[in-house]
Image (spheres, grey):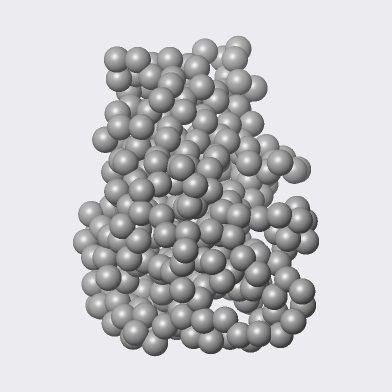
Amino acid sequence: MGNTFGHLFRITTFGESHGGGVGVVIDGCPPQIEITEEDIQFELDRRRPGQSRITTPRKETDTCEIVSGMFQGKTLGTPITILVRNKDTRPQDYSEMAQVYRPSHADATYDAKYGIRNWQGGGRSSARETIGRVAAGAIAKKILQQAAGVEVIGYVKRIKTLEADVDPDQVTLAQVEANMVRCPNTEAAEKMIALIDQTRRDANSIGGVVECVARQVPKGLGVPVFDKLEAELAKAVMSLPACKGFEIGSGFAGTQLTGLEHNDEFYTDEDGRIRTVTNRSGGIQGGISNGENIVLRAAFKPTATIGKPQKTVNQAGEATTLAAKGRHDPCVLPRAVPMVEAMVALVLCDHLLRHHAQCELLTE
């Protein structure tokens, strides 16, 4: 039913935004990976609501509970279940939405498909569902780092028309976490925060772009045709709430170049490794990682639920207006950063396991 993602490293998320809790079941995790609740909590704290004045004021600690699959600080190789209980629910804030459709939200389409929906905060369409993804992504990051030294770092690249100059090859997690908007360019971050503040005061919302880099990715991840690595990454990132665009490497800008200008020429470095002079391919060629940094970008629309009156209809098709109540992000970008990182890590971890299973069985 669309709640499971991955092949060998598989996750299934569960729960609704204002129900008892949300979480994830992870199947296919290798045994003896050292992981703690603190490792997972670090990532959840980056995603949680109420972390700054430019995010939703909903007060949730998002404290994780590892229910199964762990013993003495290590994974068992059995399914891992992680649960986060909802604490600060206010279903009454959404009572008006039981009959009235929020513009650009999932209300009307859920009714059209299922004939029933949880109108308390959006149910499964809420960004609260991503808690399970981020928790699983923490484990995927751990596996990638321990097995191959892979580092996945995301950051806010653009808010509306404010774009930051960031070097994906050099950016650090500390730089990303140095401010509330998660933009490692300090000058741009200050302008972004001011813009989000003003948008919040206006009861409106804005969108932008998250850029993500995966460094030290081994060559050979991804497979030809339908499971190309960039195709898998695109599906993963585009499955996030509010994500409306994806590009990798040169992306759409590459269409303005000639082949001679765009091609990444090869050379052999001083260690005898085949490298590329440029990286317009974004670390992937022919659907397979080439050992260069994987650089991708995800576009997030403005938050659909806003406090300004908008024209809409109710379930009977009658015209009405809606000024939404509840607690919502004026801009999803700062909290989307760990979500994008998680989805990238899940894809890379899955393909690392698939590569070992198919191509390294008889070479070790």
In depth, the one of 263 and 115 nearer the eye is: 115
Q: Is residue 34 left or right of residue 355?
A: left
Provide residue 76's location: percent of width, then percent of height.
Answer: 43, 15
Q: Is residue 316 above or below residue 362?
A: below
Front residue (pair 182, 199) = 199
Q: Where's the N terminus, which quadrant?
A: top right
Q: Is residue 322 something that shows in the picture? A: yes
Please identify the quarter of the rendering in which residue 347 is found: top right
42 in relation to 50, above or below: above
Q: Please tell me in which quadrant of the rendered image residue 158 appears.
A: bottom left
Horizontal placement of 242 versus 143: left or right? right
Residue for point 51% across, 66% down: 94
What residue is drawn where x is 53% and y is 59%?
A: 120
Please state the total of marks drawn on the protein image. Answer: 0
Task: Judge left or right: residue 176 versus residue 159.
Answer: left
Q: From the top left corner, tell me how far across and down residue 137 is, in percent.
A: 44, 40
Identify the residue at image location x=61%, y=85%.
321
Residue 206 appears in view: no
On the image, the x and y values in percent for residue 302 come to 51, 74
- Name the residue rendered at 52%, 73% in the picture: 305
